Image: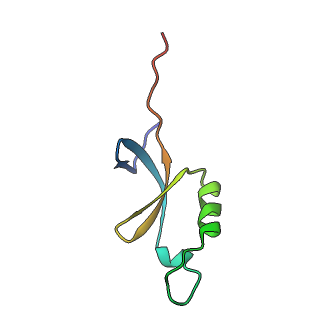
Amino acid sequence: MKYLNTIHVGDDLLEILREFNPTYFITDKTGNRVNEKLLGLWVDHLMGDRVISKDNKFLICRTIEEAQIIE
């Protein structure tokens, strides 16, 4: 499988599934509270396992597993 949108976070390689503007998930008028339930629904829908905040964007990602050699 070919991964076009990837990002390194620590020792993990993540496939970026979708990016969002954080204001999409803001629940109050002060702009301080993120609707975690809505964000979680998007993560489940896209079959992701992590959300990263980078460059004023929320990136929904999936961890790319390391290959295991079977002898």
How did the renderer colour the structure? rainbow
Above or below, comparing residue 9 to residue 60 in the picture: above
Tag count: 0
> Seen from this angle, which residue lies furthest top?
71
Residue 54: give x, y in percent of width and height.
37, 64
> Where in the figure is residue 11, as x and y percent of width and height?
35, 41
Residue located at (46% from left, 23% from top): 68
Which residue sits at x=43%, y=39%? 2
Asked whether, in this view, residue 71 is left or right of residue 39, the answer is left
What residue appears at the point 65 percent right and 67 percent down from the top-left corner?
Answer: 37
Residue 41 position within the rendered picture, expressed as x and y whole percent measured from the top left = 65, 62
Please name whichever residue, 16 or 31, is drawn nearer the observer in this view of the structure. Answer: 31
Rendered location of residue 62, percent (x, y): 51, 48
Residue plotted at (62% across, 61% down): 40
Farthest residue toward the bottom?
Answer: 29
Which image quarter: residue 57?
A: bottom left
Viewer-nearest residue: 40 or 15: 40
Report whether 23 appears left or right of 55.
right
Give residue 67's quadrant in the image: top left
